[in-house]
Image (cartoon, rainbow, N blue to C red):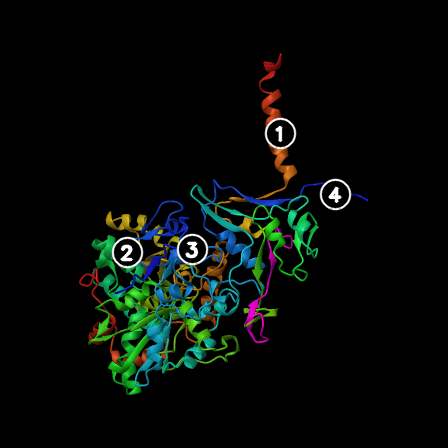
């Protein structure tokens, strides 16, 4: 690990302190009007500081570092025209371009759900415009050999995590169970609350599950040597850059995901390649691992993981589907929400936290044995991944709420229009388990799709 | 003919509240962009060009901008009458501006400056090319066109963008008569009605 993933440029920082206010783990320190600093040992890489920072490279000031040097330091393309801000993240487009250039390398890409409701904003479209078709088309024109999707990984996560929840409930396992798809949440537990690590689901995140399947199941389908596969993930998240680099995130020596770029980096790459995004036709993601259900798609918003899990778990547990697929009682905004689901004699109590700053009362309740829920979803970012640190940076703070709300609405709208809305009904998921994985929590899933958080903490 | 006498309103910042975040500059640039109002940083085609400028001093920071002066020196100085007083504001007609910089010399606040002109993200060139040297006819390129720009109090919008967006409410639109009204009320009250016998 060379450059820190999230840091503050001393030259551009005016010491306004707004990053300090928004940091959920108090990782930023600094005096008024003096450059602020991120403490990397506390930082969970959520990137909310990057989103709120308004200290840009003013044309009226003279900086010791030239713009060209600054772009190079940040790993950004020299063709970038946008203003640069003090709080920023490490850019990773150069290794990606090198990989796309190598003829022998078989490049596979996946995109998080939140990308398809935000990438269009970088091309002038209104906040939250849904563009999955153009996204797939752009990725193909960039030269990726396979255009798969994280939403497929999310469907796999539901299969595994749903089974794990049912197993813990039936067999007196550690409850409440925590979701483990948010890497900032996992890092927060490791760094500051390691006594609670046992509660985490053993599932890898959808990004990592998808990555490991691309190099095994996918490698077989395409007849490619896994050693030649370069697996890329486009994420709304800065912490995912850290997650993919974790040493234990590999299968038999091959990294699950080789590189993570953000929504913003993807847009920059599309512009750099002179692709006219707005003029692209709508294309589909590749089969089989680009096929997804609406449940997989809503992972990008707070409450989405919970809703996707409930759509499957309630039905698999009782044999009867929920009366409605639109579970309004788990949807909402920043803060803590709780709900009790009663279905065919089964009762499930759930809690959802959006915005890590709100987590303390929940942790307190768990430690004092007062937790009144069995399953907890935590997202570090205020509205979940749609408001992630790598998403298109909203220019004015007054518009952030609207931007996040529209992106969230876009994800639910997409879910409503999809033919399959439950992870366990995704035909490619059914086929994946029948032909390759066997049963959820079985030997192969355990090897490819699960991880040991306690053993691997602090890596 | 009725000659208006109310003072031109203007925006001013309170240095005690300013934290130096530059959101005012972002807001100003966004609403004055030579393109459809950009929603995200990545969608911007032109660079940021605010008309108010954050000044950082050892005492703290504060943005400065045009005062819409009564008998504005910039309007007086402009040799092509590109700066006029209209609807209680000092406005620049960019079409007439020839970039002579007399207004920059005239303004005691440094509130006016020349700004590069863009169209669809591309610099607009000046008509006058850059010559290789003063003797040859060989032209080696073009400079970007720049015209005078300053705070226009967002007269085409409901509220000044900087005032609306400042997270600390450090910027205020001052309507001078109203501002004095509030102060005079306080002064009068403190004199006569509370300490009744102090003049007897």
Number of marks in picture = 4
Q: Residues within 10 Å of mark 4 (few under 14, many from 20)?
A: few
Q: Residues within 10 Å of mark 1 (few under 14, many from 20)?
A: few
Q: Residues within 10 Å of mark 3 (few under 14, many from 20)?
A: many
Q: Are marks 2 and 4 in contact (CB under 8 Å)?
A: no
Does residue B159 show up? no
Q: Closer to the camera, B114 or A409?
A: B114
Q: Closer to the camera, A42 or A418?
A: A42
Is A221 left, or right, of A383 in this rendering? Answer: left
List the residue tagged with mark 1: B185
Distance between mark 4 and mark 1 Cα atoms? 25 Å
Where does the magenta region start and end? B133-159
Report whether mark 3 lies on the same chain as mark 1.
no
Is label 2 or label 4 in front? 4
Q: Position of residue A43 (x, y in %)?
A: 30, 55
List the residue tagged with mark 3: A52
Q: Quadrant of the C terminus of chain A?
A: bottom left
Which badge, 4 or 1, comes first in the chain's sequence?
4
Is B10 left, or right, of A137 in this rendering? Answer: right
Label placed on residue A339: none
């Amino acid at each position: 690990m060379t450059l820190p993933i999230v840091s503050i440029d001393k030259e551009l920082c005016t010491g306004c302190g707004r990053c300090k206010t928004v940091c959920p783990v108090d990782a930023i320190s600094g005096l008024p009007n003096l450059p602020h600093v991120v403490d990397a040992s506390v930082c969970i890489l959520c990137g909310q500081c990057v989103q709120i920072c308004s200290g840009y490279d003013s044309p009226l000031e003279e900086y010791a570092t030239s713009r060209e040097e600054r772009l190079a330091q940040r790993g950004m393309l020299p063709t970038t025209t946008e203003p640069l801000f003090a709080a920023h993240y490490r850019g990773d487009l150069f290794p990606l371009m090198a990989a796309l250039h190598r003829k022998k390398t078989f490049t596979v890409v996946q995109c998080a759900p939140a990308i398809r409701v935000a990438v269009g904003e970088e091309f002038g479209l209104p906040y939250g415009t849904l563009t999955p078709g153009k996204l797939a088309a752009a990725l193909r024109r960039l030269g990726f050999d396979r255009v798969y999707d994280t939403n497929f990984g999310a469907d796999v996560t539901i299969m595994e995590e749903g089974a794990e929840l049912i197993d813990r409930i039936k067999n007196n396992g550690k409850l409440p169970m925590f979701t483990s798809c948010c890497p900032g949440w996992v890092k927060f537990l490791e760094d500051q609350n390691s006594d609670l690590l046992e509660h985490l689901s053993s599932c890898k995140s959808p990004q990592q599950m998808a990555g490991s399947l691309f190099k095994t199941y996918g490698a077989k389908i395409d007849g490619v040597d896994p050693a030649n596969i370069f697996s890329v993930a486009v994420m709304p998240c800065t912490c995912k850059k850290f997650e993919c680099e974790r040493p234990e995130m590999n299968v038999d020596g091959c990294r699950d995901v080789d590189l993570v770029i953000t929504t913003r980096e993807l847009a920059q790459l599309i512009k750099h390649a002179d692709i006219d995004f707005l003029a692209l036709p709508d294309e589909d993601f590749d089969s089989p691992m680009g096929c997804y259900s609406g449940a997989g798609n809503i992972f990008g918003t707070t409450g989405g993981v919970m809703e996707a899990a409930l759509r499957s778990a309630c039905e698999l547990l009782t044999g009867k589907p929920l009366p409605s697929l639109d579970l309004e009682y788990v949807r909402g905004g920043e803060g803590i929400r709780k709900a009790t689901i009663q279905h065919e004699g089964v009762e499930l109590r759930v809690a959802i936290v959006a915005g890590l700053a709100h987590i303390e009362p929940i942790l307190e309740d768990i430690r004092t044995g007062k937790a009144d829920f069995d399953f907890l979803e935590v997202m570090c970012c205020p509205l979940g991944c749609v408001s992630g640190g790598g998403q298109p940076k909203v220019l004015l703070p007054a518009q952030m709420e609207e931007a996040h709300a529209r992106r969230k609405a876009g994800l639910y709208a997409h879910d409503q229009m999809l033919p399959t809305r439950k992870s366990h009904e995704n035909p490619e998921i059914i086929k994946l388990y029948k032909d390759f994985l066997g049963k959820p929590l079985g030997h192969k899933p355990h090897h490819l799709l699960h991880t040991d958080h306690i053993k691997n903490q602090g890596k | 003919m009725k000659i208006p006498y109310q003072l031109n309103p203007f925006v001013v910042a309170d240095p005690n509240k300013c934290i130096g975040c530059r959101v005012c500059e972002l807001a100003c640039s966004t609403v004055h962009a030579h393109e459809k109002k950009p929603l995200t940083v990545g969608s911007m085609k032109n660079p940021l060009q605010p008309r108010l400028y954050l000044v950082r001093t050892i005492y703290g920071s504060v943005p400065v901008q045009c005062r819409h002066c009564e008998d504005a020196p910039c309007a007086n100085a402009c040799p092509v009458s590109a700066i006029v007083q209209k609807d209680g504001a000092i406005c620049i007609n960019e079409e007439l501006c020839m970039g002579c910089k007399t207004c920059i010399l005239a303004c005691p606040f440094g509130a006016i400056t020349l700004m590069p002109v863009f169209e669809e993200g591309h610099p607009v060139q000046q008509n006058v090319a850059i010559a290789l040297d003063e003797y040859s006819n060989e032209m080696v390129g073009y400079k970007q066109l720049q015209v005078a720009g300053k705070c226009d109090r967002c007269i085409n919008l409901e509220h000044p963008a900087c005032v609306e967006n400042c997270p600390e409410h450090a910027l205020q639109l001052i309507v001078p008569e109203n501002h004095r009204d509030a102060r005079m009320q306080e002064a009068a009250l403190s004199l006569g009605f509370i300490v009744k016998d102090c003049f007897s």
